[in-house]
Amino acid sequence: MKSFGLIGFPLGHSFSKKYFDNKFLKESIPGCTFELFSMENLSGFINLKESNSMLSGLAVTIPFKEQIIPYLDSLHDVASTVGAVNCIKINQGKCIGYNTDVIGFELSFVPLRKTHHNKALILGSGGVSKAVQYVFKKIGVEYTIVGRKESPQENITSYSFIDASMIQSHQVIINCTPIGSYPLQEEKPLLPYEHIGKQHLLFDMGYNPDNSLFLQEGEKAGAVTKNGLDMLMIQAEENWKIWNS
């Protein structure tokens, strides 16, 4: 028996268990389970490793993608460069950290990109934001990171500085925050949406609900919009490859 799962908090919104349960059934994969391991801090990760000898791999979500790193034995090159982990392979008690957010985002974003999509606003500065930054550096998209508070040391601009000219010159907007996703589905990032137009591309890393208020604002303006579900399915398959390599 092999055990896999997802760690993070909260996990009520997660699609991962349903996805892997269906995968095991459809592909006739025997002897595998996937569970949601909700934990408020990473002492739960230590307890989980010690109590489950069958544990072979974990997906990692908010708020642990950066916090988990000191608890791991080693990092794959991409995870080390990004500074965030969303996949852990466990082999003979050793935990190796990977980042599949990168490939998930790249394969989801690039087909939507037009030639004028060369400057972006990245909302949020956490683990998934770091993966987006990695991809944008790779494919040549300039970006500005937007956070609740300005931080020149971390190159973070406050929402209060996002005006009409910023929106018009940054025709890609990526929401890497939990704002707009369950249980914050009645909220949206604080942007001057009236300046968004048909030339924009809005990408929300969230997928529950599938059409967040952020994406609805983009649709009203005629912008291209996409949620994070395809990205997460790509990640899930990449995680599976890593866990079983």
Image (cartoon, rainbow, N blue to C red):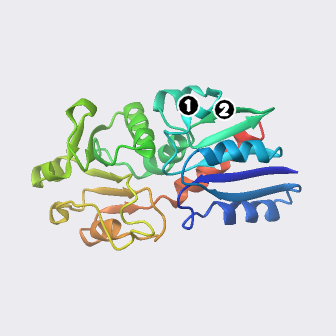
The residue at the point 83 percent across, 43 percent down is 53
The residue at the point 53 percent across, 61 percent down is 10
What crowding class fits label 2: few (fewer than 14 Cα within 10 Å), some (14-19), or many (20 or more)? many
Q: Nearer the viewer, residue 232 or 68?
A: 68
Amino acid type of disc 2? Answer: Ile
The residue at the point 34 percent across, 66 percent down is 215
Residue 238 visible in the snapshot: no
Q: Secondary structure at mark 1?
A: helix
Q: Nearer the viewer, residue 97 or 106?
A: 97
Instruction: Decide: is 81 above or below 43.
Output: above
Horizontal and vertical percent for residue 229? Answer: 53, 60
Image quadrant where residue 15 sits:
bottom right
Image quadrant where residue 99 sits:
top right
Residue position marked by numbered label 1 in the rendering = 70
Residue position marked by numbered label 2 in the rendering = 96
Check whether the beta carbons of the residues at disc 2 and disc 1 lie within 8 A of each other: no
Q: Secondary structure at mark 2?
A: strand
Residue 212 visible in the snapshot: yes
**Viewer-nearest of labels 2 and 1?**
1
Amino acid type of disc 1? Answer: Pro
Horizontal and vertical percent for residue 132? Answer: 41, 42
Q: Is residue 59 left or right of residue 13?
A: right
